[in-house]
Image: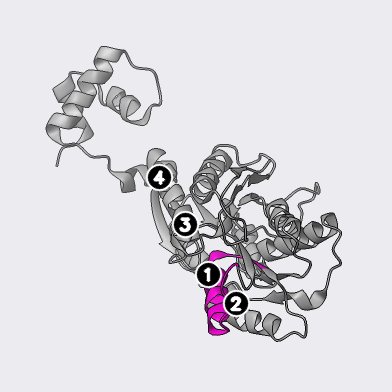
Amino acid sequence: MATMADVARSAGVSVATVSHVLNDTRPVLPHTRQAVLDAVEELGYTTNTLARSLVTARTRSIGLAVSAISNPYFTEILQGVEAAALEAGYSLLIADPHDDPEHERKVVQLLHERRVDGVIVAPSADPRGLLAYLGRHGVPAVFLDRLVDGPGTDGGPRFDQVCADNAEPTSRLVTHLAGLGHRRIGLVAGRPGLSTTSERITGYRSGLALAGLPYDGRLLVHGDSESAGAGQATEALLSLGVPPTALVTGNNAMTIGVLRALGAHGLSVPEGIALCCFDDFAWADLFSPRLTAIAQPGRDIGARAVRVLLERLAEPDRPARTVRLPCAFVHRTSCGCPSPSEEGTLS
């Protein structure tokens, strides 16, 4: 196996110059740089990452802890994280916390013990154990999709966070349905305790207020962020004396459960009941009817989380920040409109 000394000999330069070229630690004349790169290619030299980590105390690896990796939305986030990490020269270690607080702490501890430089986590509904571990060991961390409570000493967040806007897009779905004449609009919300759930409930109530509609607590049910729970929640809504004429679902998995429950009751969409969804996914345009949805920028969220983490590694003492990315309203026909007429980015 070729060594750095072999590369230096072949290129006619010092080992220090080879190191500067490979690590971008000092400017090198273009022709010298090219000679080094040619020697690297010719000899098949590869960097000894383990040896470098012993010197720099960095492994150039990132830990990613995200539940439900099979969910298309989190798959998009994973793709964004992976692409951004690779572009920056980092490898990725992935773990699934299964949305279980104790398992979440354990998998993050496992990633930390693998000496990752930092972690990116989509936290559970009860991240207290996770927060305690990260704080106790000083692990550089970025939370994505879901935010964590508890400001720092300056009133700002304790950790960097990257997520989509949740309240305004949900409000827009509600006002859109209200504009079509619906007066009883139900919400199948996600798992209690998640910031995405609480923020989308806030948006739901805001949309009702903007439309001049009263809030009825019986029309808000929790589907626990998964298909089976959403099916049961829909059954509860349909059993009301006066059931809703339109529904908003809190994520793509719950949309599937809602559609199954509606079909079991012989209700067609949108003729029997109108439907709008938070979360767009690849086949939403293939449903009949085509699903009106809020599209989250999953890839961008993942890529931004990597960039924020790398900035944290470069400046450990910088104030923590929360980055919110806009969603897009994708207007199709499940809401009851005859044809799409509007598609754009929410500000």
Callout 2 amino acid: Ala
Nearer to us of marks 4 and 3 is: 3
Q: Which residue is mark 2?
A: 230
In front: 148, or 43? 148
Residue at the image point whose x is 27% and y is 26% from the top = 18
Q: Is residue 118 above or below residue 319?
A: below
Image quarter of residue 225: bottom right
Badge 3 local density, few (<14 within 10 Å), some, or many (20+)?
some
In front: 7, or 213? 213
Q: How is the image coloured?
A: one colour
Q: Is residue 23 above or below residue 252?
A: above
Callout 3 amino acid: Asp
Callout 4 amino acid: Ala
Quarter occupied by the N terminus: top left
Q: Which residue is mark 3?
A: 285
Q: Which secondary structure lies at badge 3?
A: helix
**Which of disc 1 and disc 2 is earlier in sequence?**
2
**Which of disc 1 and disc 4 is earlier in sequence?**
4
Nearer to us of marks 4 and 1 is: 1
Q: Is 43 included in the stretch rendered in magenta?
A: no
Residue 149 appears anywhere in the view: no
Q: Is 258 included in the stretch rendered in magenta?
A: yes
Marks 4/3 in contact by CB < 8 Å: the verdict is no
Marks 2/1 in contact by CB < 8 Å: the verdict is yes
The span shown in magenta is 247-270
Badge 1 local density, few (<14 within 10 Å), some, or many (20+)?
many
Q: Which secondary structure lies at badge 2?
A: helix
Q: Which residue is mark 1?
A: 253
As measured in the structure, the alpha-carbon distance from the residue carrying label 2 to the one carrying label 3 is: 21 Å
